[in-house]
Image: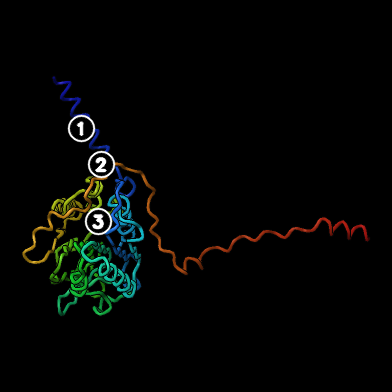
Amino acid sequence: MKRLILLAITITAFVQTGWAQKDVDTYVAVTDQEDPNTFAVIISNEHYKHEAAVPFALNDGAIFKRYLMKTLGVPEQNIKYVPDASLNDMNYNLSWLEKVIKVKQKEARAIVYYSGHGMPDEDSKKAYLLPVDGYSTEPTSGLSTEVLYKRLGAMPASQTLVFLDACFSGSKREGDMMKAARGVAIKAKSAPVSGNMVVFSAAQGNETAYPLKSKEHGLFTYFLLEKLQKSGGAVTLGELSEYVTKNVSETSIITNDKSQTPTVTAPVGSTDWRNWKMASKEAKKFETMPKAVTKVQTPADEADKPAPAQKPKQRSFLKRNTTTEQQ
């Protein structure tokens, strides 16, 4: 009997260890169903012109796109992936989403994902998403979450899901403060949401959204991806919220000695969102994929490339012989 118990414990430990070693970036559940009625905008802002970079933001967005396509079955043409987006880039792609949903109406589901800097307006305490060309000292150079939620809430979608791996306290992902901050975290106001919309945020208003360096992701994004991986996408928003909140809160205290508490905002009185599913059918087949390429190619990169080696000119043997014969 003791041998059987020990064998069971050993097998359980082996299975758990084996699962723990499955990288969320490369070991991905792949569905056999297509979801042609989901449309998404993914914005990953890592390299800022006037602020410090946001570590792993590009990886966050690239792998979230991978899960939309592979695990949830969203066609690639239905996804706008925008790395290192300017304010014009952000508005342009959100306008595309509005136009698509207007045509599709209640048939469509909209998903907006953002990884990058958030910032507060120190006077109004309103929250903003910061484009890569924005200034943390100038709120008008960012995209107000209040304006964003109004735009998304007005869309006639069956569901609108927003995931924000950003904080709005004035702090950076590494925990220190942005240029605009006065050294003290500000508690940004949470903008109201309307329509069939739910917003998942990485942290409360006065907290920092930390990275999980060992996994090369934002802490919030990592556990979002991990739950999609483990569930094969067939997870309700209620289950997703509980999993992400529990794991982010515990991991942040252990690794950072700081609190980070993800939040969910839904329209007042709305509770049915907890039963919404990311995918109707579980993806049970898994594939091992290469690491995502997350470097954004710029004109400067092209200029820095070494010039291709020039082949030495070959002397004409025929011409040489002719000359010799003439001599």
Q: Residue at x 52, y 63 (%)?
A: 305
Please tell me which residue lies in front, 179 or 134. 134
Q: Say which residue label 3 marks.
A: 221
- Mark 2, secondary structure of its residue: helix
Q: Residue at x 35, y 72 (%)?
A: 49
- Mark 3, secondary structure of its residue: helix
Please tell me which residue lies in front, 53 or 63. 63
Q: Badges 2 and 1: C-beta atoms under 8 Å apart?
A: no
Q: Say which residue label 2 marks.
A: 20
Tag of residue 12: 1
The kind of residue tagged 3 is Thr
Mark 3 burial class by Cα count in 10 Å: few <14, some 14-19, many 20+: many
x then y, percent, for residue 110: 24, 63
Q: Earlier in the sequence, mark 2 or mark 3?
A: 2
Tag of residue 36: none
Which of the 4 quarters of the picture holds residue 163?
A: bottom left
